[in-house]
Every structure is written in C-alpha cells, then in structure tokens.
Amino acid sequence: MDPVRIVIADDSILLREGLVRLLEEAGFEVVAQAGDAEDLLRKVGAHAPDVAIVDIRMPPTNTDGRPNTSPSRGQRSFSAPPAVVPSSSSIRRR
C-alpha cells in the first residue's frame, strides 16, 4: 500500500517542520510544505496530495476562517484533496 501523500501549510516554519517529522516517522509521505495560501495552491496543483493540513490563519490576510484558496483568474484549476484538516497555531495571551 502506498503511503498517504500530504501537503502541510502553516506560516510557522517550526510547526511545519515538527509536523513533517512526526508524520514521516509515522509512515506518511509529506510531498510539500507551504507558508501562505498562494504557495499552498501551487503545491497542491503540482503534487496532487491525498490530504492537506492547513493552518486556519495564514498570510496574506491572517484572518479567522478558511484561507482564500480559491484559484484566481488565469490560474490553472485542479482537484482539491479529499480532506483538509485545519490546524491553528494561535495562542491567546492575557
């Protein structure tokens, strides 16, 4: 059986690298990493992952909710991965 192919998108490189290490040690194949929504679109289009793990607050907007990952005009369309798992690295400070 082929390993599950994953793209990880988070603006925190420490979190991305930690997830990559944990997932690869567990037998998953991390095919790409992205630091913003535009890079995520490029990586998903290029690598066709089975799963994308996506931070819910990423540049360029850093707003709550789903990042704007809709292809813009003139951008090649592709099939989205069947699962998107939102992660969040935000910490509430008092």
Image (cartoon, grey):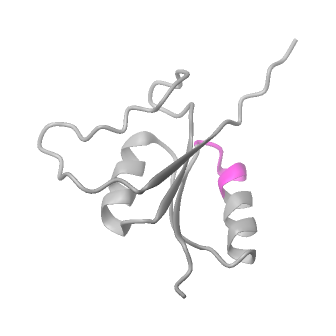
**Front residue of this view, candidates 83 and 56:** 83
Q: Is residue 61 left or right of residue 44?
A: right
**Which of the image's four quarters has the N terminus?**
bottom right
Image location (x, y in percent) of residue 56: 56, 34
Extreme residue in the right direction:
94
Nearest the viewer among 82 and 38 is 82
Quadrant containing the C terminus is top right
Residue drawn 74% across and 74% down? 26
Q: Residue 15 at x, y = what percent?
A: 71, 50
Q: Is residue 93 above or below residue 85?
A: above
Q: Nearer the viewer, residue 35 or 88?
A: 88
**Can you say whether 69 is above or below 66 in the image?**
below
| Residue lying at the far left of the rendered structure | 74
Which quadrant of the view contains residue 28?
Answer: bottom right
Question: As drawn, which residue projects farthest toward the top?
Answer: 94
Determine the image quadrant of residue 70. top left
x then y, percent, for residue 16:
65, 54
Seen at 36% across and 66% down, the residue is: 48
| Residue under the image location 71 percent in, 36 percent down | 89
Toward the bottom, the furthest residue is 1
Q: How many marks?
A: 0
Residue 34 as seen in the image, left or right of residue 94: left
Magenta span: 11-16
Instruction: Name the residue at 69% across, 68% down.
Output: 23
Please tell me whether residue 70 belongs to the stretch shown in magenta: no
In-front residue for pair 24/14: 24
User: What is the x, y in percent for residue 81?
Assistant: 40, 57
Q: Is residue 78 left or right of residue 59?
A: left
- The chief SS type of the magenta part is helix
- Is residue 3 placed above or below 48 in the rendered structure? below
